Amino acid sequence: MNADSKLLSRQGQRLLQIGVALLLLLSIEGFAIPHLAAPHLGVSAHKLAGLQSVLMLALGLMWPRLDLGAATSRIAFWLFIYAAFAILAAFVLGAVWGAGNQTMPLAGGAARGSAFQETVIAVVAYSSGPTGLISFALIFWGLRAVEHTTREKAEAIR
């Protein structure tokens, strides 16, 4: 097992751990929804955390199969983690503050905060978009079907 394979395996394991931890967190967070300043945003954050936890579990299982080098896999991994938690943080901030209508009007409804709160939510939420897109593009690239000629295959051909 080469260094890249070990790194991919370790990152896949981390995604599985984060996915299960997120499931645990959202199970507990569900009890707080009625007490939030914007319960509709709380429900949205709850659903988003559920989606992200399942996505992390799925990516964790397939991560070791990616055909990426060490640097590329690190970039994809950390950009994905950032994107997932940045958008979740924006929803949670909106739910706690009772803000977020400007950035997330469907989920936020009438929840309107101060200019500072709305700006923080917008910056955090919008920063997750490019990072998530880059991460998914790298993951998609890592799933390409590339035939590697290993020593065993080369000897079998002879």
Image (cartoon, grey):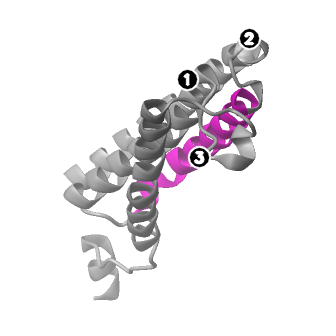
Q: Residue sitting at 42 percent across and 32 percent down?
A: 116
Report the Cα–Cα distance between label 3 and label 1: 30 Å
Dot 3: what SS?
loop
Rate crowding at label 3 as few (under 14), some (14 to 19) or many (20 or more) other CA atoms within 10 Å.
Answer: some
**Residue 22: which quarter of the image?**
top right
Mark 2 or mark 3, whichever is nearer to me: 3
Of circles 3 and 1, the one toward us is 3
Residue bearing mark 3 = 102
Which stretch appears magenta?
A: 41-66
Q: Secondary structure at mark 1?
A: helix
Q: Disc number at residue 21?
A: 1
User: Residue farthest to the front?
Assistant: 115
Alpha carbons under labels 2 and 3: distance apart: 22 Å
Which residue appears at 54% of the width and 47% of the height?
61
Q: Amino acid at mark 1?
A: Ala
Which disc number belongs to residue 35? 2
